[in-house]
Amino acid sequence: MIFSYSRLNTYERCNYRFYRKYILKEEEQPKLPLSLGKATHKAIESLVKGANEHEAITEGIIEVDFFPGVTYDEVAFLARRANVQPHMGQTEVHFTLPLSDEKNAPLVQGYIDLLQFHAASITDWKTNRSPYDVLGTYQMGLYCWAMSKIYGTPYFRGTLFFLRYRKSSTHLFTSAEMDRARLWALQLAKEINTKIIVHDMLPEKAADIFPASPSGDCKHCSFAVECMKEFSVKTLKEG
C-alpha cells in the first residue's frame, strides 16, 4: 500500500473507516464539501496554468461531473479569493517517497496544490468553513519534508490558505519539524502494515484489529450506519 496524508489521517481518526475504505476498497458516497473542494482546486489550478476565469470555473464543475449543489457562482467566488496569477508556480505537483532509508520502507505520496520553488514555498488551498493553524496537523510538515527531500533544501515554507475568509496560516518548517511529521507518518504506516498482516491471518477479527472510534466525523462517513449496527451487535454479544 502507498500511503498518503489523507489515508494516515483517516486511520488515526477511525481505524474502522480506514479498513472499509482502504482495505476492503469500498467507495464512500461523494459529499458536497468534498466535491466543492475538488471543483475549486481544479478551477484554481486552471487559472494558474493560464485559463480565463470562465474556462477555469467550467473545468472545475466538469471535474466533479456536475455534482448536485456545486454551483458556478460558489466555485467562482472561492477561486477568485485565491488571488492567483497565471504561471505563478507549479500546480498539482505529485511526489512518492519512502518514509525512511530502511529496506522496503513504506511509501508516501501526495499532491502539492502550488509549489513556488524559487521561494521554497508550498500552498494548500482550503474550502473549509473552519480555519485552523498550519501546525494543527502534520499535513504541511509532511509535504514540506517531501519537497525538502526532493530539492535538498534545509527548510520549506508551508501555507494553508482558507479561501472563504482569505485567511492564511503559514510556517517556515525546520528540518527537525519536517522530520517530526515524517516520523508520525512512518509510525502509523508501520502500524497499519502490521495490522494488515494480522488481518490476513484472522479476517474474522477485523472489527477488533481495526476498531471504530465514534466521533463527530461519523456524520460525514458513508459507513456510519452499518458501523453502528455492527458494533452494537458486537457489544451485546460481549455483554
Image (cartoon, rainbow, N blue to C red):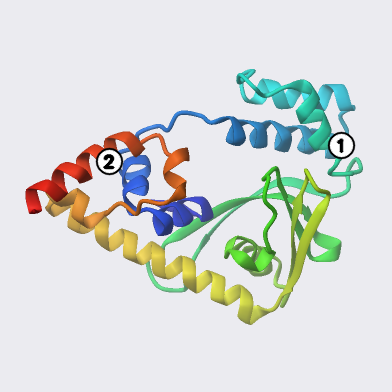
Residue at x-position 36% and y-position 46%: 17
**Is the residue 194 above or below the residue 162 in the image?**
below
- Tell me the mark number nearer the camera, choosing from 2 and 1: 2
Q: In this view, does 42 lie above or below 178?
A: above
Report which residue position mark 1 lands on. Answer: 80
Where residue 11 sits: x, y (%)? 40, 55
86 left or right of 72 in image? right
Q: Position of residue 142 (x, y in %)?
A: 59, 64
Q: Which amino acid does label 2 sit on?
A: Met
Between residue 129 and residue 198, name the one nearer to us: 129
- Label 1 residue SS: helix
Residue at image point 77% right, 53% down: 161
Q: Mark 2 points at which residue?
A: 228
Kindly state the secondary structure of the residue where label 2 is placed: helix
Instruction: Report crowding for label 1: few under 14, some 14 to 19, many 20 or more residues within 10 A (C-alpha).
Output: some
Residue 53 sits in quarter: top right
Rendered residue at 68%/64% (across/down) = 134
Check residue 164 in the rendering and tell me which mark sits there, or answer none: none
Any part of residue 53 in sight = yes
Q: How far apart are marks 2 and 1 (CA)?
A: 41 Å
Q: Amino acid under label 1?
A: Arg
Residue nearer the viewer, 139 or 81: 81
Where is residue 113 shown, x and y percent of the image?
71, 48
Upstream in sequence: badge 2 or badge 1: 1
Where residue 169 sits in the image (x, y, percent)?
76, 62
The answer to which quarter of the image holds residue 42 is top right
Q: Seen in the image, is 65 located left or right of residue 14?
A: right
Neighbour class for label 2 at 10 Å: few (<14), some, many (≥20)?
Answer: some
Q: Which of 163 and 117 is in front in this view?
A: 163
Cβ atoms under marks 2 and 1 closer than 8 Å? no
Vertical arrangement, residue 231 with respect to residue 152, above or below: above
Q: Which residue is drawn at 80% across and 33% down?
A: 46
